[in-house]
């Protein structure tokens, strides 16, 4: 494997290219194209993968990724992985970059804090084959680690994180899953509870909020995964608390056949579990896995956008749903406008993420991974309206290498930044930032 520094590498593309970025020599000396569109790679030796992207108020962005060393000590598995952070401007230029390393870590999410810093969520193992646990790093806007917490919360089993959410009091809530079989209906069952919802709370000093108990909740011998936790709006006469969003194959009146699909429930401030709802899948009899839950940004009505994958008969399809901000646990009221798979020309696309689009025809920019005939994946992006009609779609990548989406952000001028991972011709993968115009094209 050829060693080289790939930081802020710019790949020149022809003006007419809209999709199908071909792999190229990463040491090209071709002049940079206009900064109105580009593809840039980030990372060092070894393989890197993009995880998340956070837009700051000053127009700069934080990139989060995972790095696997090419020259790691084979006798020390903890030497193989780093958490990568970089701060860049909207032209993709690096302002700083940092590697954080002290164990076998896999970063999963990135969120701002109430005091102007940000937190990184990650899974880690102290030793190869050890239990998977969760840790949080608090980092300053200059890339300095301010605080961290790990192995002081969660369960006594494997815990896997999906997201971290900022709360109104400056604290945080983690969502994920655990394989702790505490809620198996029959303790002697040879096929116990495979996964329970994991969600727990801690304050802005990364201290666990002890009244929130237990950290894991399930609904019998089912697959339960929490994807996001959000604060419930205050309503006089009703208890305050949190919504937990995820997916489950819980058998219920709405899901008698036990299909996998969107699932949400309410937890009071004390942690007591309240009303739950399985709203049913758009394609009856199918399985749907939710990958992303985010806030709908103004000026669109407040609420949540959900992105996932429905396993249809012809292949995977992107599932999208848009909900109100406050839930009644009635599907027609909670999801009045959007609850469907996107009508794409291809049906082999798995949903990844989304962001609100407020320029032009307002709606959402949805990210996915297109599964090619070769088995490799490409980065897929679609602009959809507020009722999920497709305005345009683009695909980025090559036939031969593995490319995957992570996060998307719309710039004030309508241009779009797409963050993910792209494979290169030298068998390395790098974090990639793609800047396209408001129609998803590598054009001015």
Image (cartoon, helix red, strand yellow):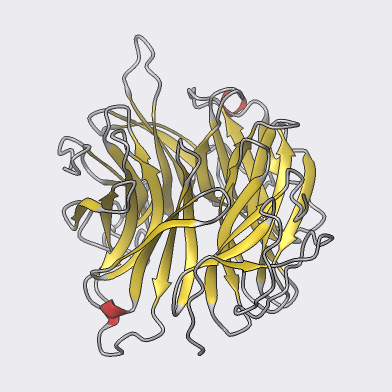
Query: Which residue occupies 39% across, 79% down?
Result: 69
Instruction: Report if residue 314 is visible in the image.
Output: yes
Tell me residue 99's x, y (percent).
33, 66
Tell me residue 441's x, y (percent).
76, 53
Instruction: Report if residue 178 is visible in the image.
Output: no
Query: Which residue occupies 33% across, 53% down?
Result: 121
Q: In which image quadrant can residue 150 be found?
A: bottom left
Q: Is residue 110 above or below residue 278?
A: below
Q: Is residue 433 above or below residue 262?
A: below
Relative side of 312 to 230, left or right: right
Relative side of 160 to 17, left or right: left
Q: In which image quadrant can residue 213 be found?
A: top left
Tell me residue 295's x, y (percent).
51, 34
Query: Which residue occupies 25% across, 70% down?
Result: 103
Tell me residue 186's x, y (percent).
30, 57
Relative side of 124 to 245, left or right: left
Q: In which image quadrant can residue 363 be found?
A: top right
Front-lying residue, 99 or 219: 99
Front-lying residue, 97 or 153: 97
Query: Which residue occupies 69% across, 50% down?
Result: 36
């Amino acid at each position: 494997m050829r060693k080289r520094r790939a930081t802020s590498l710019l790949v020149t593309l022809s003006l007419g290219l809209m999709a199908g970025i071909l792999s190229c020599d990463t040491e090209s000396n071709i002049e940079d194209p206009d900064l109105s569109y580009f593809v840039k790679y980030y990372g060092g030796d070894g393989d890197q993968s993009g995880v998340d992207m956070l837009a700051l108020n000053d127009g700069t962005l934080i990139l989060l990724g995972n790095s696997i060393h090419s020259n790691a000590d084979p006798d020390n598995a903890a030497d193989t992985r780093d958490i990568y952070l970089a701060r860049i401007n909207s032209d993709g230029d690096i302002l700083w970059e940092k590697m954080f390393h002290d164990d076998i870590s896999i970063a999963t999410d990135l969120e701002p804090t109430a005091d102007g810093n940000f937190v990184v969520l990650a899974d880690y193992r102290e030793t190869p084959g050890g239990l998977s646990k969760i840790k949080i790093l608090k980092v300053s806007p200059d890339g300095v680690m301010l605080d961290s917490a790990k192995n002081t919360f969660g369960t006594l089993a494997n815990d896997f994180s999906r997201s971290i959410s900022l709360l109104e009091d400056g604290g945080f809530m983690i969502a994920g899953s655990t394989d702790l079989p505490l809620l198996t209906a029959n303790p002697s069952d040879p096929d116990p509870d495979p996964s329970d919802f994991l969600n727990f709370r801690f304050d802005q000093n990364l201290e666990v909020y002890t009244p929130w108990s237990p950290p894991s909740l399930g609904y019998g011998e089912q697959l339960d995964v929490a994807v996001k936790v959000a604060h419930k709006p205050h309503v006089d006469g009703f208890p305050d608390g949190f919504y937990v969003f995820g997916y489950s194959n819980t058998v219920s009146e709405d899901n008698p056949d036990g299909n996998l699909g969107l699932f949400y429930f309410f937890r009071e401030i004390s942690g007591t579990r309240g009303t739950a709802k399985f709203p049913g899948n758009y394609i009856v009899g199918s399985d749907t896995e939710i990958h992303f839950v985010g806030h709908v940004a103004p000026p669109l009505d407040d609420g949540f956008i959900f992105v996932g994958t429905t396993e249809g008969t012809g292949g995977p399809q992107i599932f999208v749903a848009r909900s109100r901000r406050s839930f009644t646990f009635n599907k027609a009221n909670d999801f009045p406008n959007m609850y469907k798979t996107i009508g794409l020309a291809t049906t082999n696309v798995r949903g990844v993420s989304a962001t609100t689009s407020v320029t032009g025809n307002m709606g959402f920019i949805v990210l996915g991974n297109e599964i090619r005939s070769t088995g490799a994946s490409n980065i897929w992006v679609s602009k959809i309206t507020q009722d999920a009609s497709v305005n345009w779609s683009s695909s980025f990548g090559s036939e031969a290498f593995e490319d995957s989406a992570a996060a998307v952000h719309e710039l004030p001028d309508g241009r779009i930044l797409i963050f993910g991972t792209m494979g290169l011709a030298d068998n390395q993968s790098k974090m990639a930032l793609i800047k396209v115009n408001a129609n998803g094209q590598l054009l001015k």
